[in-house]
Image (tube, rainbow, N blue to C red):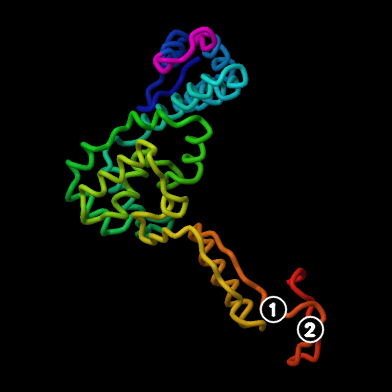
């Protein structure tokens, strides 16, 4: 049985290699509960001929996540394996990552950049300082659930493949907010990276992108109790929701059930059916 490495080479499956890979990420974990050998044995049970090493890491992380019911350190190990896998599949340069995001094209080959030109220019100009400020070891501080949440929704992708690391995302956000002031961008990055504060979801999603909608909450009121008013308001809600904004809508100006509708000589069904 063989595995396919990230460079495309085939390699015979070796139990010791898998065990060593897991053991290297066990630093600081409780050795009384977290033993790399049984973990590796469970991982190998899910192997098939030609499995990719990236899939091996995913399988190992999922195995450890399942074993977290035995001890919470397994969740930590699962996160470390998943983060290490992402690091092996992504660039350790923010500039290279931003270039891939800027040069993105859709399925028809049309330019569809995923970061703004302003942020790209800023990152390119200050590449040395920004890359020097990045600390990718901080990615290993996420627990498994937190990292998988970032992986599922927050980290940007190119043609379905994740190209951002958590630290890339945080620096993108910092640069999106402070483009033009590299010191402020790095300071903000460090505060977020060290978990001294965080921005809300719309900011993490959109900062630094061509559509930097960073507000979390929107309060609207129904424009009027009419077809035009109701559907204009719904359109506003849809546009806000599209960019991850939260919405509260006041609808107290809509007629109650049984209210007379002069235009049709009918009666309102009230708020609930609407």
Disc 2 is placed on an element classified as loop
Q: Quadrant of residue 84?
A: top left
Q: Position of residue 15 (x, y in %)?
A: 48, 9
Q: Position of residue 274 (x, y in %)?
A: 73, 72
Front in this rendered view, residue 77 or 28: 28
Q: Position of residue 264 (x, y in %)?
A: 77, 90
Dominant secondary structure of the residues highlighted in magenta in the image: loop
Q: Quadrant of residue 65?
A: top right
Disc 1 is placed on an element classified as loop
Count of numbered badges drawn on the protein: 2
Front in this rendered view, residue 199 or 38: 199
Residue at x 54% of width, y 71% of height: 236
Residue at x 31% of width, y 54% of height: 176
Q: Position of residue 152 (x, y in %)?
A: 51, 42
Please tell me whether residue 28 belongs to the stretch shown in magenta. yes
* Numbered tag placed on residue 254 in the rendering: 1
Q: Quadrant of residue 273?
A: bottom right
Q: Which residues are magenta?
A: 24-37
Between marks 1 and 2, how big is the CA–CA gap? 9 Å
Please tell me whether residue 155 belongs to the stretch shown in magenta. no
Residue at x 27% of width, y 37% of height: 134
Q: Which residue is mark 2?
A: 259
Residue at x 51% of width, y 21% of height: 60
User: In the figure, 45 relative to 274: above or below?
Assistant: above
User: In the figure, 68 relative to 94: above or below?
Assistant: above
């Amino acid at each position: 049985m063989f595995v396919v490495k990230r460079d495309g080479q085939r390699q015979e499956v070796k139990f010791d290699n898998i065990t060593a890979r897991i053991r290297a990420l066990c630093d600081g974990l409780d050795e009384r509960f977290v033993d790399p050998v049984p973990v590796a044995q469970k991982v190998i049970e899910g192997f098939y001929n030609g499995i990719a090493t990236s899939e091996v890491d995913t399988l190992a992380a999922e195995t450890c996540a399942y074993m977290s019911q035995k001890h919470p350190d397994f969740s930590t190990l699962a996160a470390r394996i998943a983060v290490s896998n992402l690091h092996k599949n992504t660039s350790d340069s923010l500039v290279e990552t931003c270039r891939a995001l800027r040069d993105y094209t859709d399925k028809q080959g049309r330019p569809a950049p995923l970061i703004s030109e302003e942020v790209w220019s800023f990152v390119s100009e200050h590449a040395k300082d920004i890359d020097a400020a990045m600390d990718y070891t901080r990615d290993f501080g996420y627990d498994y659930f937190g990292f998988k949440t970032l992986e599922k929704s927050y980290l940007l992708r190119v043609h379905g493949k994740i190209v951002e690391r958590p630290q890339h995302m945080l620096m993108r956000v910092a640069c999106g907010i402070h483009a033009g002031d590299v010191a402020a961008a790095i300071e903000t990055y460090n505060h977020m990276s060290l978990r001294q504060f965080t921005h809300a979801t719309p900011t993490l999603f959109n900062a630094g992108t061509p559509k930097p909608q960073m507000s979390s909450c929107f309060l609207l009121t129904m424009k009027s109790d009419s077809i035009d008013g109701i559907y204009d308001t719904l359109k506003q809600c849809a546009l806000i929701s599209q960019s991850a904004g939260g919405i509260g809508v006041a609808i107290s100006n809509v007629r109650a059930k049984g209210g007379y509708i002069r235009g049709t000589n009918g009666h309102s069904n009230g708020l609930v059916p609407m």
